[in-house]
Image (tube, rainbow, N blue to C red):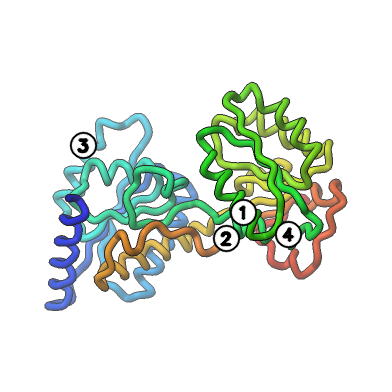
Amino acid sequence: MRRVILAVILCCFISSLVQAEELITIAVIKSQADTPYESALQGIKDELRADKVKVRVLGYELKKNEQNSYARMAQEIKAANPQFVITLGTIATKFAQQVIPEMPVVFSMVLGAERSSIDPPGVSLDIPFEMKVEYMKRVIPEIERFGVIYSPDSYALYKEISVACAKNEVQILGTQINSAKEFPVVLHDILRQIDCYVMLSDSMIYFPKAVEHMLLDCLHQKIPVVGLSSPYTKAGALISFDCDYHDIGVQTVGIIARLLKGEKATQIGILRPRRIRVSLNSLIAKRLGIEISNNLMREIDVIFGK
């Protein structure tokens, strides 16, 4: 029913644009005040200016511990009657899809969107594992076996990286744990059998103390680590992959353009980031005895330990 309503709204809106060049109103809801969200928001604004669209952007932010203001915010958005609502982050996306379901929502900056109950269209934060595996094969061509530890929460990610490894003719050794207490023992065992350890997004496994232990153990065993993002690289992972948040904002505007041309939300689906930023810890590379070519070094966006 929700999708039928959205389809009717979009058809009416497209018809009105044909009749006259109207001012488009877009409401942007951020999950919180955070640098990545600000970068994505800037990407949205830059792309709208580049397209020379007559648009009014209304900004909203869901602040922590102020849930009483959420109802008032929903009323304000409904009163503004925007043609589209763009959400930045999981909290903002769930808020919009639950509280103002009658409005067309285009989400972005959501991790694990394909594995959740979030409706398309939108842009997730999930970087394809196939890209990570291919890149690591360029960094360390002799890699033969990746290792991962996962829980039931991250089992889907383990299956995804398994497919990526199979396509690239790389073996993968994965071990499931059901409690954070199992992690140190399982990690020690798996490091003796692999060439590279890959972190999966899983808050049950990777809390600060566990990450510190993992990085030290991997370094001691001379096993390179693929981190979740640049802070992990800075802390001791060999390499990590980040989304280009500004470009995610640009992608999000692109979805709106496709909707205006008549594509359905289900046809667009959930897009993945198209631009990736790579970070490297050069000190860790030296300690592991890994030599990286000059050509590859020039592709890396952030280098720690210069």
Q: Quadrant of residue 175?
A: top right
**Closest to the observer: 41 or 157?**
157
Q: Which residue is drawn at 73% across and 59% down?
A: 137
Residue identifier under label 4: 137
- The reply to whether discs 2 and 1 touch (Cβ–Cβ < 8 Å) is yes
The residue depicted at 18 percent of the width and 46 percent of the height is 76
The label shown at residue 71 is 3
Within 10 Å of the Cα at label 1, are there few (<14), some (14-19), or many (20+) other Cα atoms? many
Q: Circles 4 and 1: CB distance less than 8 Å?
A: no
Q: Residue 241 carries which label?
A: 1
**Which of the two marks, 2 or 4, is nearer to us in this view?**
4
Q: Tell whether label 2 touches label 3 (CB within 8 Å).
A: no
Q: Sequence-wise, which precedes: disc 2 or disc 4?
A: 4
| Foreground of the two, 256 or 59 | 256
Q: Name the residue under label 2.
A: 276
Q: Earlier in the sequence, mark 4 or mark 1?
A: 4
